[in-house]
Amino acid sequence: MDQDRRTFLGQTGKLLVLTASAAIAWEHVLAGRPEDAPNYRSTDHWWGMSIDIEKCIGCGTCVRACKTENDVPREEFMFRTWVERYVVDPADRDHPQVDSRNGGYDGFHEREVLDPNLKMFFVPKLCNHCTHSPCVQVCPVGATFESPDGVVLVDTAYCLGCRYCVQACPYGCRFIDPRTETVDKCTLCYHRITRGLTTACSETCPTGTRVLADLKDPKDPIHAFLREHMVQVLKPQMATGSRVFYNGLDGSVR
Amino acid sequence: MPGVEGFIYPNELELQWSVLIVLYPFITGLVAGAFILASLERVFNVEAVKPTYRLALLTALAFLLVAPLPLQLHLGHPERSLEMYLTPHTQSAMAMFGFVYLWYLMVVLVLEIWLDYRRDIVLKWRASTGLSKHLYGAMALWSDNISESALKLDDRIGRALTVIGIPSAFLLHGYVGFIFGSIKANPWWSTPLMPIVFLFSAIVSGIACILLLYFVTCWLRRVPVDMACVDTIATYLFYAFLVDFALEMLDLIHRLYEADESFRALDFMVKTRLFTSQIVVQILLGTLVPLVMLAVTQLVSLRERTRRVLYVLAGSLTMIGIFAMRWNVVIGGQLFSKSFLGYTTFKMEFATREGLLPAIVLMILPFVILWVLIRLLPPWGHGEGDRGRRAGV
């Protein structure tokens, strides 16, 4: 009888555990929106990125990772993220030599400049996920929107393909995906960050140049980064509230 | 990369807005300009331009019906365009296009034309048989009351509509200018002068268009040109053009003097890639030459025939100049990189959705519509817009 009761309790226990696990798993399956995911609250986060220019070696790994992770067309003029190489004569900052062949996808082979009077550095770029996004402002149907956690996203099922947002972005971060005839841009790997992962570019960066930042998390290293470095954003005169913060950004960078 | 000079952001290689988006402000400009010319006669009682009153209204309608087509063709998903009406994003300048357009089309233009033509429509309804009888009956909304008091009421409402119509025409085209002028990312576009420059250039192109159409219709109908009418229109064209030119020069001088961070890039662009379309076609051939021609007609007393030739030449050059202005704004604004470090090239396609062929078709279409409208509602004949007669006075 004891044996029977033990068996009964054991089996019941297993059943309960399995049912509970299945229920949690099913909830995950059903979770279409990040708010539905039990461990992710969009209102708890405020995403951005820190980029340390002094660490970037121009290897292009981030560009390749982004294209692979996000199925970005392999065209030479469609990028969610790209890397630019600047060669600057400090005495003539208005005329920097800039190139970004294939968006830096293949990596830059010339990583040092021979002329001692010039300086060279790499600038990774991506959507700045602006707090006052000009692209969000101009979208006629609201297909481009800002998520509660501060990521600028595109509803491709709703986008008209009018390209007004492409014109409005001061940073050249948007392009039209010829497969869908809708606009495409960096999502800050939203499908990853809402599952607790980092972005593909940050994940693969060998030097830790690019680091995903959660400005609402008091323990996030971004706070120390912003405190300890002289940090700048791209085109601050545009007053877009950019949330991609650069350390070591030279004044010649456009 | 081919066609690229200097450095551009990788995503900037492709131009986003093509020749169809050049047509959009050009066509809406003609609508606004033609309507404003018509309104002069109605509101300010300028008797001399009466022969062009109805022609201007019908021309405005023909072009307005075509105005959304280039936008529609250009969209990646034209089937979703209705969303702009159903779920507009109220902060977006572009989202308001549908509402401004519908207001202008339905409330101002169609209603005004209907009220103006109601007597003619009813008379045609009574006189015709078969299918045309049904057509004119439907156009009259099956109401055949053309009593003196009814026509007087039509006239009163029509006048009120014109008064509403003038600011609406200003709104329509000023708004098109705002779509470009409010883009802070693009220094070639971003200026508060843009709506007002667009508005005055619209008035100029509309007046020139009606002037030319009037000559063409007189020639086709083999009737003499009313010289008092074309002289008055040419005077309006001259003064509107002077204001437009002054505004454009103000913008240019302001840019030259301020010489902000974008100046070097834009200056280089104007001197190279835009030299022909901006300096030669827009400013020299399309503005200064017609202005000089018009000035001569204002200052020197010339024979009728000479004046007619000068008006046709000046009108044609003006149209080319204003088209070039739209081209230089829309295409020129996309030829330089937002990094201000490089330039790309516009490659016009031919038989594609956004190519030259659909652009040509879209420019012919308003004239086909105008021909149909003129057949349905002849703008000339007894009195050519004689309101005294219509009102039964």
Image: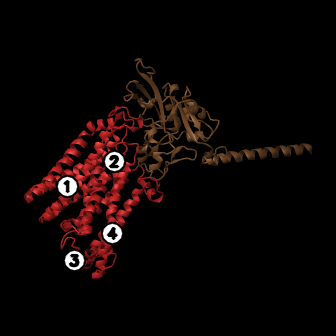
Describe the element under mark 2 as helix, strand or loop: loop
Classify 10 Å Cα crowding around label 2: few (below 14), some (14-19), many (20 and above): many
Sequence-first disc among 3 and 4: 4
Q: Do labels 3 and 1 share a chain?
A: yes
Please name the residue that numbered disc 2 is placed on: B354
Closer mark to the observer between disc 3 and disc 2? 3
Quadrant in which the C terminus of chain B is drawn: bottom left
- In whole angstroms, how far apart are the C-alphas of marks 1 and 2? 34 Å
Q: Which of marks 2 and 4 is in front?
A: 4
Q: Please tell me how crowded label 4 is: few (under 14), some (14-19), or many (20+) other residues with Cα within 10 Å.
A: many
Q: Separation of disc 3 and disc 1 at Cα?
A: 32 Å
Check the rendered structure and report the hue given to chain A.
Answer: brown
Mark 3 touches mark 4? (CB < 8 Å): no
Q: Which of marks 3 and 2 is nearer the N terminus?
A: 2
Indicate whether B122 appears above or below B258.
below
Label 1, label 4: how many angstroms apart (C-alpha)?
Answer: 27 Å
Task: Name the residue carrying label 3.
Answer: B389
Q: Which residue occupies the foreground of this view, A65 or B54?
A: B54
